[in-house]
Amino acid sequence: MGVVRIVILMVLQSVFLLTVFGQEEADSNAIVGQKKFTYTDEGWQFTSHDGNYLMHLEWRGQFRFAYPTDSDPLTNEDYADKELNLTIRRARMKVGGHAYRPFLKYYLEYELFASNLLDFRLMFDRFQFFKFKVGQWKVHYNRERIISSGKQETVERSILTRPFTIDRQQGISFYGRLNGPSVLDFNYWISILAGTGRGNQRNDDGNLMYMTRLQWNFLGESLDFTGSDLSYHEKLGAIIAIAGVTNQSPYTRFSQSGGGQITGFEEGVAGQYRVNQFLLETAAKYRGISWQQEFHWKQIKDNVNFTDTYLNGNLMQIGYFPHYALDFVPQKLEAYFRYAWYDPDLHIDEDWQSEYTIGFNWFFHNHRNKLTAEVSFLSLNADDEQVSDSDRIRLQWDVSF
C-alpha cells in the first residue's frame, strides 16, 4: 500500500509539471530566457513565467548509528537492554510552493520509510499580520518540536518531547506577526484542531483541541525555527514565548505515529482524558551562540477513573562555533550541550528522568548536509526508588537534496 501511495504522489507531481509548464511552452507570449527549472536551498524548483505557480521538490535522508539504544529508555528494563542500531531514521519527500497567486501556498511532506503522510496544508499568506492555514501539520506549540529534525542542533530531540509535544494535528490555524516598534513586536498562533493526532480524520467526541502561542520578539527580531547560529547574528536576537493547549481525547500524548499513552496510563476510550498544558520558552542567537530553553507543565484528568496527574519538565540547550574564539578551530565545527529533566508525577517525591548530552556538528553545507556526533548520560528513578542509568553514543549523517 505504501508503494502505491508513493507512485500516486509521483504521478500527480508529473501531471502538475506537464500541465503548468507544458502549457507555457506553447504560449507565444512566454518570456524567453527566464529560468523555469533551477536548484535552490529548498531542492529542485519549477517556476512558471508569470510567477503565479512555483513548486520545489526535495528529498531527505537521515542515517544513524546508535549504541546501546537509539530511543530514550522509559523503564528499568529498557536500561538493561543493549543493542547496536544502524538505521535509516528518516527518509522524506517534500513538495511545496504556491499556486494561482504567490500568497496561496501549499506544502506536503511524506515519510517514505514508514509510509506516512506527515504534512499536507494550504496557506493564505498575503498579510504579515494575519495568515491562516488548513490541513495537517506540526502544530506551533514548542520550539524544540517545531524545528525540523533536519534543522535541529542535536541528533534527536530531548526526553521532554515524548510526554509534552502535541505533534501533528488536523485543523485550522490563524497566525501572524504584529511587527510594532522594538518591544511591541509579537508573533501569535491560534489553532483549532481535531485533537486526535496525525492520520486520524475524526474527532472522538464533541470536544476539540485548542492551542495558542504568543511570542514576544523584544529585540525586534523573530528568530527562525532552526537550530545553531549559522548566520552569525551580529546583534542579539532573542524571544520569550508562552503557550497553552487544552484537549479531551482517548490519548495522553502524541507523536509522529498519532495518539498514544504516557507510561503508566491505560488505553483510553472516547473523551477519557482531559489534558491541559502550559509552556514557557526562551531562545536567543548571538555571534555563533545559540540558546533555547523550555519549561513544560501538564495536567491529565482521567474522566473514567477520576484521577488527576500533574507532570513537568525543563530543558536547556546551548551551542557555539568555537572558531569565533579560537581561529585554529575549523569554522564548520559546532559544539553543543543539553540538559533536560522530567518529573512524570508531581505527587510522587522520588521519580524523575534526566538527560545530559554533549555533541558536535560538522556542517558540509549548513543543515542540508551535516554530520553529528553526540554522547548522552541518561538516568531514571522510578517510583520503586531503583535508579537506572546508561551512556549512549549516536552518530548521524543528515542530507537533503
Image: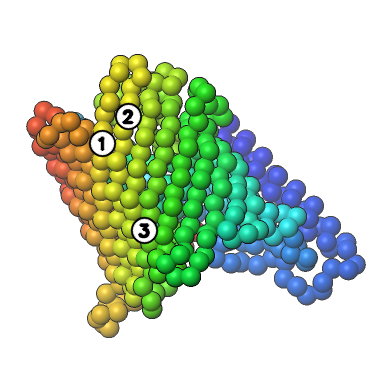
Distance between the alpha carbons at the discs numbered 1 and 3:
22 Å
Q: Position of residue 229 (x, y in %)?
A: 37, 69
Q: Residue at x 19, y 41 (%)?
A: 353
Q: Residue at x 88, y 68 (%)?
A: 29
Question: Which residue does the numbered mark 1 point to in the structure image?
Answer: 311
The N terminus lies in quadrant: top right
369 sits to left or right of 157: right
Residue 120 visible in rendering: no
Circle 3 crowding by C-alpha within 10 Å: few under 14, some 14–19, many from 20: some
Distance between the alpha carbons at the discs numbered 1 and 2:
8 Å
Q: Position of residue 309 (x, y in %)?
A: 26, 29
Q: Amino acid at mark 3?
A: Ile
Q: Amino acid at mark 1?
A: Leu
Relative vertical location of residue 174 with respect to residue 382 in this rendering, above or below: below
Q: Position of residue 188 (x, y in %)?
A: 49, 53
Which is more toward the observer, 345 or 243?
Answer: 243
Asked if the residue under mark 2 is in contact with the one under mark 1, i.e. CB atoms within 8 Å, the reply is yes
Question: Which residue does the numbered mark 3 point to in the structure image?
Answer: 240
Is label 2 in a helix, a strand or a loop? strand
Circle nearer the N terminus (3, 2): 3
Circle nearer the N terminus (1, 2): 2
In this rendering, which labeled residue sits more in front, label 1 or label 3? 3
Q: Residue at x 75, y 73 (%)?
A: 34
Which is more toward the observer, 393 or 246?
Answer: 246
Distance between the alpha carbons at the discs numbered 3 and 2:
26 Å
Relative vertical location of residue 392 with respect to residue 103 in this rendering, above or below: above
Question: Which residue does the numbered mark 2 point to in the structure image?
Answer: 300
Circle 2 crowding by C-alpha within 10 Å: few under 14, some 14–19, many from 20: many
